[in-house]
Image (spheres, helix red, strand yellow):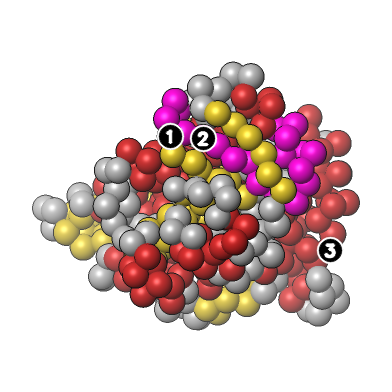
Amino acid sequence: MATVLVFGGYGAFGGRVVERLGRERKVALVVAGRSLDRARDFAQQVQSRARAKVSAVRLDAGQVTAGDLAPIAPLVVINASGPFQRQDYRVARAAIAAGAHYIDLADARAFVTGIGTLDAEARAAGVLVASGASTVPAVAAAVIDAEGAKFQALESATIVIAPGNSFDPGLATTQSILSTLGRPFSSETTAPGAGARMHGWQNLHRRILPGLGARWLGACETPDLDLLPQRHPGLRRVEVYAALEVAAFHLGLWALSWLVRGRLVHEPERLAAPLLRAKHALRFLGSDVGGMVVTLEGKGRDGARRRTDWHLLARGGHGPYVPAMASVILAKALVAGTLKVRGAIPCLGLFT
C-alpha cells in the first residue's frame, strides 16, 4: 500500500485532496499540519466514508526535514500548505532527500517557475517534483494544450477564475490573494498599448461569463504569464483574471489595491482574518456556483481568425475541487506507476 502525505491536509484545498484520494483502496493517507488535533479530527471525518486508511501527524511545512518524513516513508508528498509566496523549497527538498515524489498546489509565479533549480537533485533521487498542480497553471495548461491544437497560430490566451461566494478560501489562501494586491508585475505578453507593467487586482473591467452572469475582473500574477508563451511559441498575450461573485467584495479588493499601490497600506495580508470573518458572515449574498473560462484567439487551421471559449461551471459547492484535482490525478498516476516523468518541473503536460 502506497503512502501519500498531504501538508495542509485539513485546509480549504488540501482537505479536498485528502477527500478525493480517500476513495482509493491502495492508498494510505496521512493528513499533516501544524495542529495535530485538527489533523486528527479531519482524518476521522474522512475515514468514516473512505476506502483508504487515513491517519494524522503533526508536521510543520516550514520546518520539516527528511528525517521527519523517514518514519512515514511516503511515496508521494503533496504540499497544499501555502501561501507559496512566502515559502522556499524546504518541503520539496525534504521529499527528495526522503526518496518521495513531490507535488504542490502553488500558483505563485516565482515559486513555480523556479522549481527547475531542484531538477538535478530530483533526477538523482529518481523522483518527480511537480509545482503548480492547481487551477493555474496545471488545469489551464491542459485546456490550452487541447483547444490550442485547433489553431494554426495561437496568439492570445485569457484565463478567468470565478469562485462562488459560498466558498471560504481559508487563511493561507486569503493571505496569498491579499499579498498580491496593488503589487506591480511585468510580462512581455501584456496586451499591446498597456505596457509591460500591471498591478495585482487592477485592470478592472466587466465581463459576462456563461452560467455566472456579469462579473468584475481583476488582473492576477500567475506562472502562466511565463510558462504558456514558452510552451506555445507565438503566443503574444497571456492574461489571468479573478472574478468574485459579489461585486462589493471584488470592488473592495480593487480599492484596497490602490491603497497598497499608493503606499498607504503596506501589508494587506495582515487583514486576512477580519476580511475572512466578514466574508463568512455575508456568504448568503452569493451562491455555491463558480467557474472558469479560457478564451483563445489566433489563426485557425483554415487560415481564418478564430476564437474559442472553454467554460467550466461548478455547481453545488464543487468549485474548490478544481484546484485540488490536478494533484489527485498526479498522485494516483504515481501510485499506479503509470507516470514515468522524473525531475523538477512546473506542472504542465503531465495530464490531458
Q: Which residue is mark 1?
A: 1
Q: Could you tell me which residue is drawn at 68 percent across and 64 percent down?
A: 62
Compare marks 1 and 2 and give the one earlier in the sequence. Answer: 1
Q: Position of residue 25 (x, y in %)?
A: 44, 25
Q: Could you tell me which residue is drawn at 84 percent across and 63 percent down?
A: 270
Q: Quadrant of residue 299?
A: bottom left
Q: 310 or 229: which is nearer to us?
A: 229
Disc 3 residue type?
Arg
* Cα distance in 3D space between marks 2 and 3: 36 Å
Q: Is residue 90 left or right of residue 294?
A: right
Marks 1 and 2 in Cβ contact (< 8 Å): yes
Q: Is residue 129 above or below residue 166?
A: below
Residue sticking out furthest to the top: 49
Residue 305, label in figure: none
Compare marks 2 and 3 and give the one earlier in the sequence. Answer: 2
* Cα distance in 3D space between marks 3 and 1: 42 Å
Q: Is residue 41 left or right of residue 318?
A: right
Q: Which residue is mark 2?
A: 28
Residue 247 in view in this figure: no
Q: Give yes or no for residue 32 being in the magenta stretch.
A: yes
Q: Could you tell me which residue is drawn at 70 percent across and 57 percent down?
A: 60
Q: From the viewer's perspective, is the residue at label 3 or at label 1 nearer?
A: 1
- Give the position of the N terminus as an image quadrant: top left
How packed mark 3 is, by other alpha carbons closer than 10 Å (few <14, some 14-19, many 20 or more), is few
* Cα distance in 3D space between marks 1 and 2: 6 Å
Compare marks 3 and 1 and give the one earlier in the sequence. Answer: 1
Residue 338 in view in this figure: yes
Segment tinted magenta in the rendering: 24-42
Q: 270 or 221: which is nearer to us?
A: 270
